[in-house]
Amino acid sequence: MKTLETQTQTIASRIARHLRKFQTREDGTMVIFAVFMLILMLLVTGMAVDFMRIESTRTRMQGTLDRAVLAAADLGQTLPREQVVQDYMDKAGLGDALQGTPTVTEGLNFREVSAVAEATVPMMFSGLAKILNADATVHESMTVPAFSVAEERVSKVEISLVLDISGSMESNNRMTNLHTAATEFVNTVLKDGNEDLVSVSLIPYSEHVNPGPDLFNLLNVRKVHNYSHCIEFDNSAFNSTTLSMTHQYQQMQYFQWNYNGSYYHGNDLSETVCPRWDYERINPWESNRTELVTQINNLRGRAGTSIFLGLKWGAALLDPSTQPLLTSLVGSNKVDSSFAGRPASYSDTETVKFIILMTDGENSTSSRIQSWAYDSDSDYAHWSRYNFNWYLDNYVSTWKHSQYSYLKYNRTLGNELMDDICDAAKAQGIVIWTIGFEIPDPVGNQVLADCATSPSHFFDVDGIEISNAFSAIATQINNLKLTH
């Protein structure tokens, strides 16, 4: 027994001695620390991998959902909106992620589509946390959400198309090229389905602008004859885009002073200062493509050039001050009733306003008959029958010629008035594009460039390049009127 007891004590003594040695030895410490750090590194690296997978899934799902709702919100989209979104998600392998049915809200000029998606991503390395802490809460997966909304809205658009029909437009095939370019422009901005959102006022101008009998009769005009319908503006009128409903305007004299008849055309009356044919009149707030295109293709070159007058009318037909005119024309079924309330207020965020001005030259001189020779019915009738210069050359002594007329506009004044109305329009937020069509004088191009909203809104073109200019403008208008 003693021997067994002694042996037991010896074994216990050895174990105790080894335990004391283990307790005091330090060479195993780094192994334990290394194992701990390895587990920690695996956990951190694993978490990074998991989060990368989560972010990758979220990015792919969000991108697919964004594309899906954009396609569904397209106003040109004819398929069911919900089907479009689901199809995009299915083709990306995310069909099960779509939550519920996409929400679609749409009206006359807009469509909004929103959708929610959700995906579950397994956490591959989260279990490592249990090694470090058995009580740790471990998420075996994570839910990744995505939300997207897209809207396409067609703004209401008001356009003034101000076209030069002066005599020089008959040279070098310019008028034919204008017919083609302006027709393409109208067909681009007036597409099927948006006719009630886009109004185009066509303003042909030469030495003057004829608003036509409908507008003329609605204004406060001192009417003196029945030959044409042009009105005169005070120079101060070009400082504003407005057209007064109370100011009394003077009716433009009806006569022809250019082309000295005695040398060229006899008693020529083909190009009176005020245009008189139907196709030369303003066509206000129009949405009928056929009518606009027909009128454009009937345009012919005539008389001199008063760009500033074309711009004044172009700006006025975009100005809210002319709402009473439009209201009256709607009432007489001469303007589409869908345009009631136009021209919209400049503060209306749903409406954009544009002037597109085309000319092949510069402002030219323009004369008027002295009031003493144009103040009675017999005078009005007389000058409607005779070319002004032809009559003077044949019936009036040369030394008296200067007593019959005065110069109302010259190029310098015309450019100043043009600057005034351009500045007034731009101050109201009207976007102005200008097209210089085969203008030889750099000064003329500079005047147009100064009028434009920015340098990129001015086009200097030759020949068929005019079609490219109108096409570029139409494309930009369509881009501006679409808000995503």
Image (cartoon, grey):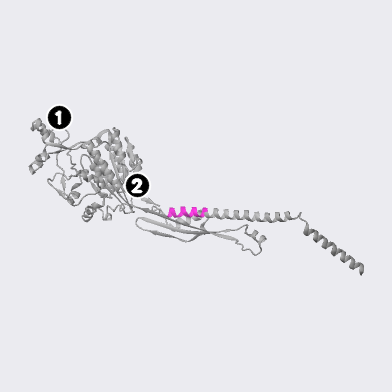
**Residue 358 seen in this snapshot:** yes
Q: Which residue is mark 2?
A: 477
* Predominant secondary structure, magenta span: helix
Residue 470 is situated, as x and y percent measured from the top left of the image, at 33, 42
Residue 64 is one of the magenta-drawn residues: yes
The numbered mark at residue 54 is none
Residue 264, horizontal then vertical, whole percent:
16, 30
Q: Secondary structure at mark 2?
A: helix
Q: Nearer the viewer, residue 98 or 127?
A: 127
Q: Which mark is residue 263?
A: 1
Determine which quarter of the picture holds residue 32: bottom right
- In this view, the residue in front, 403 or 123, is 403
- Density class for disc 1 (Cα within 10 Å; few <14, some 14-19, many ≥20) is few
Task: Name the side, left or right, on which 426 lies relative to 408.
Answer: right
Does 61 appear above or below 228?
below
Q: Residue 392: where, in percent of width, then height?
A: 10, 33
59 left or right, relative to 184: right
